[in-house]
Amino acid sequence: MPLPPGPRQPSVAQLLQFTLRPLPFLDQCLARHGDPFTMRVAGLGTYVVVTAPELIKQVFTADPEALPAGEANAILEPVVGRNSVLLLDGKPHLRQRRLLLPPLHGERMQAYTQLMAEITDAALDEMPLGAPFSLHPHMQAITLKVILRAVFGLDESAERSGLERKLAEFLRPPPTITTFIPIKYLDFPLSPYRTFLARRDAVDVELRAIIRARREAADPARSDILSLLLAARDEEGQPMSDDELRDELMTMLLAGHETTATALSWAFACVLENPAAAARLDAELDGARSEGGRLDTALLPRLEFLDCVLKESLRLRPILPDVVRRVRAPITVGGYAIPLGVDLMPCIHLAHRRAESWPEPDRFLPQRFQGAKIDPYTWLPFGGGIRRCLGMAFALHEMKIVLGGMLARARFRLASPRPVRVVRRTITLAPSGGTRVVLISRRPRALRAVAGAS
Ligand code: HEM
């Protein structure tokens, strides 16, 4: 039985399109071939792309043994390592998820508010007034500090150790064209791949030093992820090895900070491009002030329109265009029997642009989320099913504190009237120029009350 229809171009041409102009390529495939369609991508494999909520539901609710994600995420192995939760399947995956979840659970979020607000304030104070600059590096610095301190329980010594700088270097994206080229073609002296390896090794040295230090000074009272992972024992009573710990730390650092920084840069772009939404958000933030003009940070997570703005910006500008599951047991999708070894790809970008699910899908309309119940098969910026992003509650909370906190204290405008475009940044979709803005005015820090202080 044939696969669903798809582009007839050679697989190398499809690789180039998916790498260099991913969204127009996906849009064209759907318009020409319907849902589901098949992409053949040189070096990566065959993808059956699904878009309609009922097909996405079928993939997200399938038996994880029949549609594992770990194998399909193998492209991330050089970065996160083979013991990463992203690459595991079955029992080891569930065990790792259980270990990582407690500090990221919704109820824990209030504990992070003050720290996030302080880091946000400090970052805002660093921004230049009156001259154009790119927001993305500032957002990266914020989200990296937040993850290192709140989730790993590290303090300023992480900065002193150079981990932050080395991570920032490691994360500088390689030329886009290299994103999906198989490593065997990139492994030669002075190649971007070798630079990547050298930077990764520099980060590894720091991570292993942190693991060693924490092992030596174990403190049972600590509840950060690193401490929980160090204390964890498997069925045979064995602790995690240094390699396993290193891979999980790298996973949380990368999955947790780059994505959130990019999502924040997009949220700023969406707000600044839409004056009506910006004015409404301003009014809501004003309502969160006391008579003296002080903002109560603890109120930010409860502001409804702020929540809608973030959800709508993640709909219109998802950070990852898709997620993948590998077919390991017979399955029929949209009337097609999908052969074993093929990847099923719920397409976040296309699901978010379906007019049936989202009227006027290309417009930024945060009010569409007001009082609405979210359907996990039409809004999926964090993926879904048993693999749904572990950091969703954490990321949404952080985005509220950072976006709300900055807009309450400062006024920005976009540096150029030209629309912010989508550009690929390795596997993520980022705003062009990292969202270039001008900071027009900034209130003093005293006009913000930290986390409920009176
Ligand atoms: C706006 C920010 C973020 C976005 C858009 C995002 C998106 C995603 C997506 C699409 C997946 C794949 C889900 C799937 O395959 O169905 C994922 C997985 C994951 N994310 Fe996030 N993420 C974000 C922030 C975070 C944060 C803050 C953390 C941790 C602190 C985190 C940790 C993880 C982990 C550990 C996984 C793997 C889950 C598994 O395989 O079971 N992410 N994320």
Image: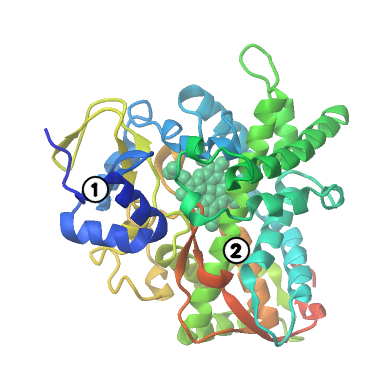
> Where residue 397 appears, x then y in whole percent?
60, 59
Question: Which residue is at 74% across, 55% downward?
Answer: 145
Callout 2 environment at 10 Å: few (<14), some (14 to 19), or many (20+)? many
Question: Which residue is at 28% across, 62% downward?
Answer: 27
Q: CA distance from mark 1 to mark 2?
A: 30 Å
In the figure, residue 80 lies in which quadrant? top right
Nearer to the camera, 338 or 187: 187
Q: What amino acid is labelled 2 in the image?
A: Met
In the picture as drawn, the residue positioned furthest to the top comes out as 236
Which is nearer the N-term, disc 1 or disc 2? 1
User: Disc 1 marks which residue?
Assistant: 54
Question: Which residue is at 13% across, 40% downward?
Answer: 335
Q: Is residue 219 visible?
A: no
Dot 2 falls on a residue whose secondary structure is: helix
Q: Which mark is residue 399?
A: 2
Question: Which residue is at 56% across, 62% downward?
Answer: 262
